[in-house]
Amino acid sequence: MDGQADERRTTRAGGVDRVLVCNPASGSGDHAEEIRARALEREFDVRETETAGDARRLAREAAADGASLVAVAGGDGTVNEVVHGLVDADALEAVDVAVIPTGTANLFARQLGIDDVDRGFDLLDQGRRRRIDVGFADDRPFVNTCLAGISAEANTSTPGELKRRLGPLAYVLTTLRLLPEYDGIPLRVTLEPGVPESETWRGDALLVLIGNAFRLPSVRRRDRPSTEDGLLEVTILEERPDPETLEEGRLSRLLEGDLTPVTRLEVSSLSIEGLEEEPVTFSLDGELVSATALEIDVRERCLSLYVESTTDAGELS
């Protein structure tokens, strides 16, 4: 029996109850030993990825093995793969998920107040879970964002070393560097397709941001957290802003449409269609997908996730 198999903690013959999927190459790439030790203390079966797609496969196998909890140590892309694996296994609503942020930006974890590895394990120990929404682009899940336009381009163009040194700031710097040269992509965006008199936007978009957990600054007050409202926030940046609009302190005015045309709406479904022959590059939680069109919707409160304690209705014991 190999070393990894020796470390497994089983709850019944042929099955495991708690699995941790670890991407040892995420972020600075120096966390694997610590993650493994802390996970084994909590009786997790630790399974490490070696290449792209492994986290999806390991999550699918964990569900098939009978796991009731799958923790994921990695960045946004690894979290996306784990959720995708649970979708593959038709186990999204049956398996709890915990996030141990070890990636470069960890945007999804930060949206949920999980700032570091210690906080991720603390939340596991507290045992508090919430059911959150998951977005779907065709059959592909995303928990944080679906992007098209310049932000998707920035995901492909940001050097790994820059991400390691600067974290989320690396994506911002790359976006600003690309902006003067970026002409946008011709798109048709239909909001609530299939609904009579549904609204359609058509034009050259510099940026399309569809947020599930992630939302841009807004004056709107929410009755429920954005991760549980059954809605996606759609932001379309229609024209290149003047460079001075990107100065510190003016971003909120830009996003509210005061300085350049911006469309901001909240919907439960939409479709995006490229108006040229070449497929459009989309980024789903940082994972790149090429498609000529996508049908996008949200499944409300379908994922049970370990997060901060709360008294809202979405909390599970």
Image: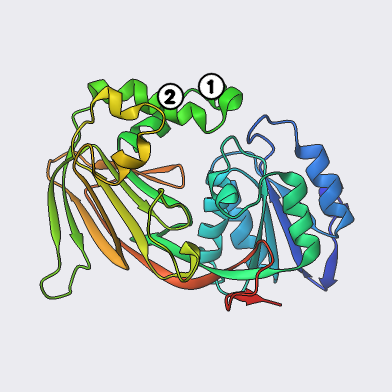
Up-down relation of residue 7 to residue 206 (above or below): below
Q: What residue is rendered at 34% in x and 28% in y?
A: 246
Q: Position of residue 52 (x, y in %)?
A: 54, 41
Up-down relation of residue 175 to residue 20 (above or below): above
Quadrant where the C terminus is found in the figure = bottom right
Mark 2 and mark 1 in contact? Answer it, CB < 8 Å. Answer: yes
Residue type, numbered disc 2: Leu
Query: In 3D space, how far apart are the residues under numbered discs 2 and 1 (Cα atoms)?
Result: 10 Å
Q: Write down the residue under mark 2.
A: 173
Of residues 51 and 272, the one drawn nearer to the viewer in this rendering: 272
| Disc nearer the start of the sequence (2/1) | 1
Per the rendering, the mark at residue 162 is 1
Q: What residue is rendered at 46% in x and 52% in y?
A: 214
Up-down relation of residue 67 to residue 105 (above or below): below
Residue type, numbered disc 1: Leu
Q: Position of residue 152 (x, y in %)?
A: 35, 37
Q: What residue is rendered at 22% in x and 68% in y?
A: 192
Q: Nearer the viewer, mark 2 or mark 1?
A: 2
Colouring of the image? rainbow
